[in-house]
Image (spheres, rainbow, N blue to C red):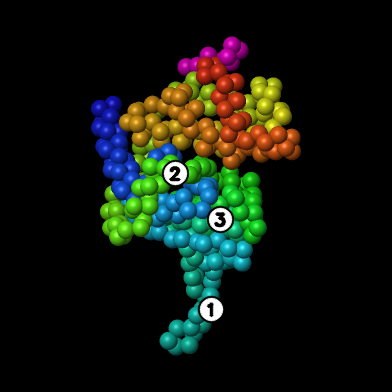
Amino acid sequence: MAEEFEARLAEATRTTSRLFDAIAQVIVGQTEVVEQTLWALLAGGHVLLEGAPGLGKTLLVKTIARCLELEFSRIQFTPDLMPSDVTGTNVLVADETGRRSFSLQKGPVFTQVLLADEINRATPKTQSALLEAMQEAACTIAGTRYELSPPFFVLATENPIEMEGTYPLPEAQLDRFLLKVLVPSPSEDEMTQILVRTTGHEHEAPASVLSREEVLTLRRLCRDIAIAEPVVRYAARLVGASDPSSPNAPEVVRRALRYGAGVRGAQSLVLVSKAVALLAGRAHVSFADIARVSKPVLRHRMIRSFEGEADGISTDQVVEALLEHVATRPTAGERPTA
């Protein structure tokens, strides 16, 4: 069994490497962004990409969709977008005999890879239309529940610098995203390469690398990655220390936060760490994996206090403080590990 698992793991590493190379044919730089997006793909979660205009967020999502043999839809979120524009609705239609009946006109959410472009431009009411789909891979219309075809993967983008005509994402909506990935500006060399690529002749679209069944197989394999109890406890202590009311919380948490990451944050730490190990070709999760994924997993799950906002303390700074404060090994007093 161990040899079989190692063989599956090696094949998965080769497959994900081909996917990474295919994306790199289109996307210049942004290695961490691409890698973190693949973490979510393997772990079965959704991604919120935040960055200034023109950094390739939408292009990245389109490229990933082309590299996967999956259905793709795009929703351009605007203030006048309605929930039915996302989910679809029942409409009255007439057949050849003139008999009328209601027929479901499915919305763009009925897909496998969904680009929610500029998601913070829609009202909270419209944003909430995605909640059930993101959490349960299903959609309820007029009292009837419709299952979405797996794998259902939402990649949303938002622009952090525009305030007029935007709506902050509700905490419940943010918590549905497995990762919040910050898209940085390119370096001078990367900018030069972008200019060369985008001002000449168009390049061919990348070929499909992964089929639907291969994606589902990788997701199942990700769940099979082992994680020792001490490492799970480390993830639990990190999230527990993010609660300002916890006696184990560092001073910066008590001063800068109103609410910590919560249980879903701890679950996400473990799942994404398994994806990191899978991409690295390892059969187990390490303490370093938990630390590595902490920022994209936790940064959007913690709510700052007024004092934290006034002092300009970012949630990334809070995560850094947690990593310095929380020990990797269980402290004295905790029950011994198996």
Rendered location of residue 236, percent (x, y): 56, 27
Magenta span contains residue 61: no
Q: Which residues are magenta?
A: 331-338
> Mark 1 — residue?
92
Q: CA distance from mark 2 to mark 3?
A: 23 Å
What x and y, as percent, mark residue 245? 71, 28
Q: Quadrant of residue 319?
A: top right
Marks 2 and 3, the one that precedes in the sequence? 3
Q: Residue at x 63, y 26 (%)?
A: 241
User: What is the crowding at mark 3: few (fewer than 14 residues within 10 Å), some, or many (at least 20)?
Assistant: many
Measure the C-alpha gap from mark 1 to mark 3. Answer: 30 Å
Q: Is residue 147 above or below residue 277?
A: below
Which residue, given by chain and number where applicable, does mark 2 sit on? Answer: 186
Instruction: Write the residue at 62% across / 63% down.
Output: 79
Q: Nearer the viewer, mark 2 or mark 1?
A: 2
Q: Secondary structure at mark 1?
A: strand
Tags 2 and 3 touching, CB below 8 Å = no
Q: Residue at the bottom extreme?
A: 97
6, 103: nearer the viewer:
6
Q: Is residue 124 visible?
A: no
Identify the residue position indicated by label 3 in the image: 119
* Side of 241 where 24 appears, left or right: left
* Left or right placement of residue 211 versus residue 183 in this view: left
